[in-house]
Image: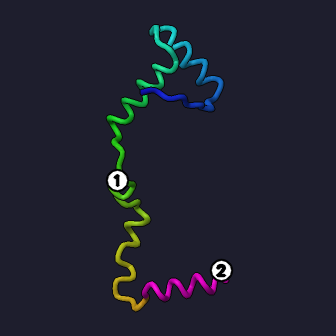
Amino acid sequence: MSGKLTLYIDDDLISYVKDYAKEHQLSVSKVVNNFLTILKQKIPKRHSHALGPTPITQSLKGILRHSDINANDYHKHLEDKYL
């Protein structure tokens, strides 16, 4: 099954892809489809947390482990801040 997709791409990149497609006797759609297929194979769909935490997040991990802060404290903070 195929679908239509509108992309906004820099003019110089469009020219490059058109030249590449012509040189390899492919349509631009086929070139984009092939690229996205390869991308999908190399980077499978995952939840972002499956890729691991960022360095900043990793440095904060466990920082509040021994504190008395709970969800109610956070909710009160949000109420004070926004209400």
Residue 51, label in figure:
1
Vertical arrangement, residue 20 with respect to residue 47, above or below: above
Vertical arrangement, residue 60 with respect to residue 6, above or below: below
Location of residue 50 by image quarter: bottom left
Instruction: Give percent across and percent down for residue 82.
Output: 65, 80
Q: Tell me where the magenta segment starts and ends, as one range.
A: 70-83
Residue 80, label in figure:
none
Vertical arrangement, residue 49 with respect to residue 60, above or below: above
- Is 82 part of what is drawn in magenta? yes
Looking at this view, name the residue that lies furthest to the front. Answer: 1
Q: Is residue 47 left or right of residue 31?
A: left
Instruction: Give percent across and percent down for residue 70.
Output: 42, 87
Q: Residues within 10 Å of mark 1 (few under 14, many from 20)?
A: few
Residue drawn at x 34%, y 53% as measured from the top left:
51
- Is 11 part of what is drawn in magenta? no
The quarter of the image holding the C terminus is bottom right
Residue annotated with mark 2? 82
Q: CA distance from mark 2 to mark 1?
A: 33 Å
Residue drawn at x 63%, y 29% as measured from the top left:
10
Q: How is the image coloured?
A: rainbow
Number of numbered discs: 2
Instruction: First in sequence, mark 2 or 1: give its number.
Output: 1
